[in-house]
Amino acid sequence: MSEPLEIHVMQDQASLDLPLPSYQTGGASGMDLLAAVENPVTLQPGQWRLVPTGVRIAIPHGYEAQVRPRSGLAMKHGLTVLNAPGTIDSDYRGEVGVILINLGENPFIINRGDRVAQLVFTRVVTARFVAAQELAESGRGAGGFGHTGV
């Protein structure tokens, strides 16, 4: 097992009463992000909103954090992360925010401290484009969306 990735974190003054993001089980891939809203926020069906978390993080170069939906909120309420996965780059130092959208049929209330998304850390590979006159052949070729059937 490798050493855990060290992430420096700061809480905004208004969120010091909330716990830091954490893993809920030993095998969890994502840390839960908590809503740092001052008052309950209601998301109507079809409505989205930036939900503050009150935390700022410093991600080491060569890594990123991805903000992903929580499966229980998606399944039970139709709540998801609008730009899933949201990317947090290693040089970003602002507050982590979650763009939540209610795709469900009923209003959804977000309360202070609710677990609203999860944060997954992953390595980043940097690419460099090289101009080419042709590309190497492949078995798939230019077959795109749905080319292998249903």
Image: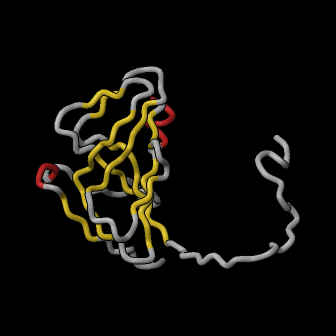
Disc tally is: 0
**From the viewer's perspective, is residue 102 above or below residue 100?**
above
Q: Horizontally, is 127 left or right of 40 in the view?
A: right
Locate the C terminus and report the quarter of the image it occupies: top right
Residue shown at the point (26%, 70%) measured from the top left: 8
Visual colour scheme? secondary structure
Q: Residue 119: x percent and y percent?
A: 40, 56
| Residue closest to the eye, 127 or 31 | 127
Q: Horizontally, is 120 left or right of 98 in the view?
A: right
Q: Residue 19: x percent and y percent?
A: 22, 53
Give the quadrant of residue 91: bottom left
Q: Residue 76: x percent and y percent?
A: 47, 30
Residue shown at the point (79%, 75%) measured from the top left: 133
Give the quadrant of residue 77: top left
**From the viewer's perspective, is residue 70 above or below residue 30?**
above
| Residue closest to the eye, 4 or 46 | 46
Residue furthest top in the image: 106
**From the viewer's perspective, is residue 2 above or below residue 110?**
below
Give the quadrant of residue 10: bottom left
Q: Horizontally, is 78 left or right of 92 in the view?
A: right
Residue shown at the point (24%, 42%) measured from the top left: 113
Residue furthest left in the image: 13
Q: Residue 116: x percent and y percent?
A: 36, 43
Q: Horizontally, is 109 left or right of 123 in the view?
A: left
